[in-house]
Image: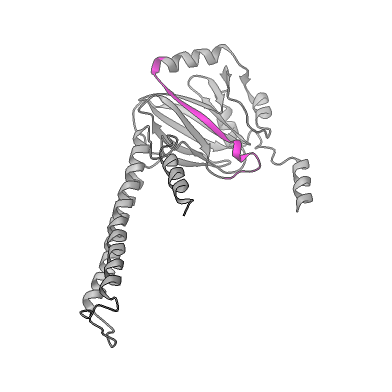
Amino acid sequence: MRRLPLIFLLGSLLCACDASIVAPAGPVGQAERQILINSLAIMLVVVIPTIIATFIFAWWYRASNSKARYLPDWAYSGRLELITWSIPTLIILFLGGVIWTGSHDLDPARQRGENPLEIQVVSLDWKWLFIYPEQRIASVNQLVIPTGAHVHFTLTSASVMNQFFVPQLGGMIATMNRMVTHLNVQADRSGTFYGQSAQFSGDGFSDMHFVVRAVSAAEFTNWIGAARADGPMLDRASYTQLAQQSRNVAPFTFRSADPQLFGAIVSHAIPPGPGPRPEAIEKAQDVN
């Protein structure tokens, strides 16, 4: 019993956390939160009356209640069967309707505006590479987008399968080797948001997170200019070095990026990530 206050306190702290789907910063995140609320409301329509009915039945059929009818030979009631099956059927229909409409409205590949900002995303071991093909720059573990602008992500993996997820912007999408997926989001307000890999992908998985900064159009232009003024160049040689396994990589930018690099990664014109190092395999075998 002494642990109950601590449990409630931890729960309230988690609910107050901004880096979650319940604190959206864009239309996709808001729609996903609404689906969760609607689903919860539909399920509570069954759960709450069931809990109340449990207490009512326990109270009414107590041993001291002489008014309660005892029917030892009762076996079937068509009316009760109708109620028992109709309520779950209606719940399934309502939930199915919410899921059906939501799955179409929130299709990751559905374009949500004109003239989107194109960003190419590559999941590496264990970091994220963001290429801005129109601006000819790139960044690692740092994603900067203008508020109010439609952003179109084209995603792939240079190694194992991963999951790109920014909870407050909504939309979790897989990144797969030699495949391309698409995601469209928008940030309605300025802020710094948490992005992560939502799928275990090896030893450095816990460090595979990134920062999303939603800034004004003017600040975004200034950031582009600052990135072009400093940093290394992203070409095939530097990408090969970047693709080596590394952990907890601090965010940095490339002042220029090869516009053909993403296509080369997808088509395997550039070989995929090297995979586990021999010493890591030997260490794992020793542990086993």
Q: Please state the horizontal and vertical placement of residue 140, each as a whole percent of the image.
A: 57, 27
18 vs 4: above or below = above
For the C terminus, which image quadrant? bottom right
249 vs 206: above or below = above
Image coloring type: one colour
Point out the stretch of residues depicted in magenta: 200-218
Question: Left or right: where does residue 13 sit relative to residue 263?
Answer: left
Q: What residue is at 57 percent from the left and 18 percent from the top?
A: 256
Q: Please state the horizontal and vertical placement of residue 66, each as a whole percent of the image.
A: 22, 81
Picture quadrant where residue 273 is located:
top right
Question: Left or right: where does residue 61 sit relative to residue 121?
Answer: left
Question: Left or right: where does residue 13 sit relative to residue 123?
Answer: left
Q: Please state the horizontal and vertical placement of residue 112, each as a whole percent of the image.
A: 34, 33
Q: Please state the horizontal and vertical placement of residue 209, each as a whole percent of the image.
A: 55, 34
Question: Left or right: where does residue 235 sit relative to residue 197?
Answer: right
Report whether residue 92 is seen.
no
Magenta stretch encompasses residue 216: yes
99 vs 233: above or below = below
Q: What residue is at 65 percent from the left and 28 percent from the top?
A: 242
106 vs 240: above or below = below
Residue placed furthest toward the bottom: 73
Q: What residue is at 65 percent from the left and 33 percent from the top?
A: 247
Name the residue nearer the viewer: 190 or 235. Answer: 190
Magenta stretch encompasses residue 128: no
Report whether residue 24 is seen.
yes
Q: What is the count of numbered marks?
A: 0
